[in-house]
Image (tube, rainbow, N blue to C red):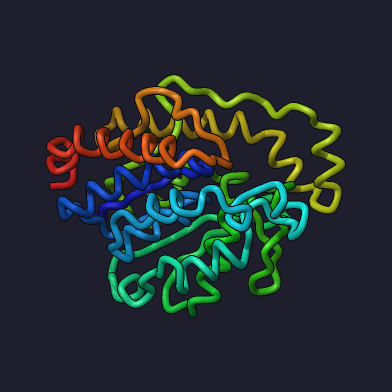
Amino acid sequence: MKKGLVLEGGALRGIFTAGVLDVFLENNISFDGMVGVSAGAVFGCNFKSRQPGRTVRYNTRFCRSWKYASFLSLFLTGNLYGTKFCYHDIPERLDPFDLETFQNNSMEFHLVTTDTETGYPLYHRCGDDSRDVLMDWFRASASMPIVSKTVKIGGKQLLDGGISDSIPLRYFQENGFEKNVVILTQPPGFQKKKIRFTPLIRFLLRKHPNVFQTLLDRHSRYNSQLAYVQEQKAAGNTFVIQPPAPLGIGPIERDANRIREVYQTGRAEGEKCLPEIKHFLN
């Protein structure tokens, strides 16, 4: 029975996920494959490269840098999260990403993007991609609409996977992963609401009308996915980890202590469920 790990996104709410994953690494909890969406992919890759602490380390180190994430970056480059700084300077030299370990780790790594032409999810299994191509896939998965440029890969223009498939549990089940751990970044009882300011969003996404249409229905699709996760949990083939309360952190956070608090919340949840996780996976 293939065991999978499914990681929701949520910008810096993904620091919670990083805390859980570091506890897994430290306790030798392993999976046959993982799929990440947006921050779930960008932060989750450190689980496959076996680099505990890396996510919280570079986020706290660079959280006050405009080159990392800022409206100045958005104004100057078209990206809220600076492409060069986030996907080249940090992983190549400031806090190196261990590409060799990532590629040599036999665990499958999938991620989700959104095809801007169709508005549908486009999935990618990361294999022997070069460093630059891999970083482009990570960036595509986390490129939030309106505050990011599209990422061109293989002739397709891609954006954030959370637009079209925020919790890809069904996708992983369809790929043969029968027993899955799902890490959410919203607390129990959360329900997504319909987007507001639709005329403005329609205008800002006028070049990508199918992305706009997908966003219009995202709330109902997301809430249906949450219900499906709970159904699968009740069926006994899915284990769910999520924060006990709203994390209270947005896409930009200048307070390193707040980032550490969210990380520690993830660690606490990971440590609390360790005995159950071990039993579930065995």
Residue 104 or residue 25, whichever sits in front: 25
Q: Is residue 264 above or below residue 155?
A: above
Residue 212: tell me if it is visible: yes
Q: Is residue 255 above or below residue 31?
A: above
- For the point 43% across and 79% down, the residue is 128
- For the point 69% across and 42% down, the residue is 214
- For the point 27% across and 59% down, the residue is 32
Residue 35: tell me if it is visible: no
Residue 281 or residue 199, whichever sits in front: 199
Which image quadrant for residue 176?
bottom left
- For the point 62% across and 54% down, the residue is 81
Q: Is residue 247 left or right of residue 72?
A: left
Q: Is residue 130 left or right of residue 235?
A: right
Residue 12 or residue 198, whichever sits in front: 12
Which image quadrant for residue 50?
bottom left
Which image quadrant for residue 107?
bottom left
Q: Is residue 178 left or right of residue 70?
A: left
Residue 272: x and y in percent read 19, 32
Q: Is residue 140 above or below residue 169?
A: below
Residue projecting furthest to the top: 189
Residue 17: x and y in percent read 37, 43
Quarter of the image containing the N terminus? bottom left
Q: Is residue 15 above or below residue 221?
A: below
Residue 120: x and y in percent read 64, 51
Residue 130: x and y in percent read 49, 80
Q: How many marks?
A: 0
